[in-house]
Amino acid sequence: MANETNEITMPTKYDPSATEAKWYDYWLENDVFKADEDDSKQPYTIVIPPPNVTGKLHLGHAWDTTLQDLLTRLKRMQGYDVLWLPGMDHAGIATQAKVEQKLREDGIMRYDLGREKFLEKTWEWKDEYADTIRAQWSKLGLGLDYSRERFTLDEGLSKAVQEVFVRLYEKGLIYRGEYIVNWDPAQKTAVSDIEVIYQEVEGAFYHMKYPLADGSGHIEIATTRPETMLGDTAVAVNPKDERYAHLVGKTIMLPVMNREIPIVADDYVDMEFGTGCVKITPAHDPNDFEIGNRHELPRILVMDEGGKMNENAGKYEGLDRFECRKQLVKDLEADGTLVKIEPHTHSVGHSERSGAVIEPYLSKQWFVDMEPLAKAALEAQGHDDTKVNFVPERFEGTYLRWMENIRDWCISRQLWWGHRIPAWYHNETGEIYVGKEAPADSENWHQDEDVLDTWFSSALWPFSTMGWPDTDSADFKRYFPTSALVTGYDIIFFWVSRMIFQSLEFTGKQPFNDVLIHGLIRDSEGRKMSKSLGNGVDPMEVIDQYGADSLRWFLLTGSTPGNDLRFYWEKIESTWNFANKIWNASRFALMNMDGMKYEEIDLSGEKTLADKWILTRLNDTIDQVTRLVDKYEFGEAGRYLYNFIWEEFCNWYIEMAKLTLYGEDEAAKATTRSVLAYTLDSIMRLMHPFMPFLTEEIWQHLPHEGDSIVRASYPTRRDELHFADSVPAFEAVMNVIRSVRNIRSEVNAPMSKPIQLFISTSDEATQDYLSANETTIGKFTNATELEIGRGLTAPDKSMSAIMTGAELFIPLADLINFEEEIARLEKEVAKYEKEVERVQKKLGNPGFTGKAPAHVIDEEKAKEKDYLDKHDAVRARLEELRK
């Protein structure tokens, strides 16, 4: 799609809607994102954190994937064999909850359909939302190798999941047992820690008297969940608590249930909290479960899977757990057991998917024994060949602390959508068989109904997507371990850690060399984006309004690694202006290239100071941007690029180039055209990983070789185009021009008004720099008379400015009408005197200073200082004119 004739067909304003879809289709049609599988190139691999097939991508997804896109585009241009592997996660409970909700709207329950029909509906859902996600990836411009797209429930990944489960089971690291899990009564399944959202809830402490069985008194306990007392099997005190030492070994009569339970001593009990006595309900609290194990207490489950009280709850059987609480409190109050109700705000876990209050619940589940896996992962961090580098480094501490305190992992879920647990139970003996296929006499066995936790399969993502367990797979051998993982700090515990220990266990290698951690996207006030606040932003809406490149630039440059990012529409608009600045500069350059072809670019000719300076600054920019991107400092790299493009290239070089381009020296014009073409081409390449669509569109109009900028080489420093002396020389010229413009601004003198300009230099180098560029200075300052020399004195009534190596003077008589300027300045003085008087009167009023908030008073004091400074500056200028 190269523009051979280099015709100027670019519109006056950049229109992303007319550009972006066209180029993405072109990239896909030409397989520019497909991995090369070229042994002569070094591999660079990223596997996308697979989004859940539950709906549309949000701004956090856009941030995460755009960071990956920058890395893969950059590495591809630097000559690496890049594989960026796409895929999606089946997201067990999240997807099943969505499908069930949709069915309920039609009056259908999943049990009405049965497992197979329900799964058919869920696959339909997956296909629909997978298409949506791909469409959004394309709008963001993501350079994914779609030929390798994977899904956590596809055949290959399912094979890997079975392999891992069976191997861990055979090694004794997977076991089945009873334990307290996070239970969602609405979905009737165990859920992982990450699927629990904690919310502050107005609750209460219920203080109760438990009578001693021997009738000698009572002890007082307090709980936020009185309904669980029906399952109490002990009361615990601290063995060092002298208040209760004489009671250890005695029993109490459990109110309502009239069951005799022991008083035990356990170090877990905090003597300073509450009364120092704790009710123990091993079937409904994880800490009580551990205490129960230590003291061999029975476990009495008083609720069913739907959160209703069961047969162990006595007369409360059949009541919802919260209805039971209300009735039980009334009964306890009536019989004098309830001492008091103390209001208490506390953090309560809710299911992320159903919104139900999570119930700590005793359940028979499958678990992974984490101690040996965590130990191996911790040891791996001490060796360079297996160490994972966290960026920023502080997150390694977060990872290590979690691994050091890890608990066994509950991996079973009471769902239908997911990887079915490869375990079978004998119909008669109850014997358990675990294998990759059903037992030979399958009619005598039934498979476990549960599925595996979503994180079990996503923990294998970096190597299961490469063909493992087939270790001879070409992709596994070439592209694993992966180069980098990009993800948010909120899932270090749940996903990053699990990928690391599973990869070490099954491949002997770390899953990725680097982990780049980013934060969360918040609104302009710093609040987390949520449906309840209504402050979410759809990335597709941003793209529709401003284009993908504007959103990408904001996401890539708006934060430092590990930190949160605040979303501002104003910053998106500012980026849009930057994109148009690049567009307009490119249009100007192309209009002055006179149909130049790539082979006609010649940088060997005699160059102007501006030519040498921009080529040198381009070298510096290439060095700095490459260094910063290698350190994942995308924000700093973007700042450097922005300043080079906007200030140095657009505001200075293009303006200077006009002198040559509009001149008569054909050789000089040809060289400047070449410098312009080369510099703009390099800018497009540097900017391409940040703004792929805009840069492809402009690059195709520039003289170039190759079919797409995606496969163009990334710029590198060229020492033969580095002219170190040009930088101080050009800076001296810029300082003069800036100083003159500032003086004109101070006295309201337009550029169209000619001036006299005297420059007194204080060193030989500055004298040489300025003298050699006298014509340029004269044209850019509109100085009809210009004198540059050593030790020049200031003319009468002149404005002056001091710069490095020189002082310049402009006689005011050439710039202003003295009488008009004095009258204007007198009005300015009077205006500021009034403002100062108003503010000082306000600050002197006790009624204001005594009542106004401190920040309001500080604002008024700041105004006072500002007005005084402006008043003094204007008065000084006025006195200078009156001399």
Image (cartoon, grey):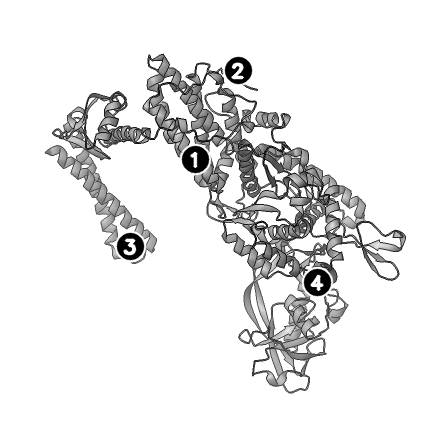
Q: Residues within 10 Å of mark 4 (few under 14, many from 20)?
A: some
Q: Determine the CA span between mark 4 and mark 2.
A: 76 Å
Tell me the number on the disc at residue 410: none
Number of numbered discs on residues: 4
* Disc 1 element: helix
Q: Quadrant of the N terminus?
A: top right
Residue at the image point whose x is 56% and y is 49% from the top:
532
Q: Determine the CA span between mark 1 and mark 2.
A: 31 Å
Q: Which of marks 4 and 1 is nearer the N terminus?
A: 4
Above or below, comparing residue 257 to residue 694 in the picture: below
Q: From the viewer's perspective, is the residue at label 4 or at label 2 nearer?
A: 2
> Which residue is label 1 attached to?
623
Foreground residue, 319 or 14? Answer: 14
Task: Give, as a three-letter code, the residue at label 2.
Answer: Glu
Q: Determine the CA span between mark 2 and mark 3.
A: 72 Å
Task: Give, as a three-letter code, the residue at label 1.
Answer: Asp
Q: Earlier in the sequence, mark 4 or mark 2?
A: 2
Q: Determine the CA span between mark 1 and mark 3.
A: 56 Å
> Which residue is label 4 attached to?
320
> Which residue is label 2 attached to?
4
Discs 1, 3 touching: Cβ within 8 Å? no
Q: Which of marks 1 and 3 is nearer the N terminus?
A: 1
Q: From the viewer's perspective, is the residue at label 1 or at label 3 nearer?
A: 1
Discs 4, 1 touching: Cβ within 8 Å? no
Q: Which of marks 3 and 4 is nearer the N terminus?
A: 4
> Which residue is label 3 attached to?
848
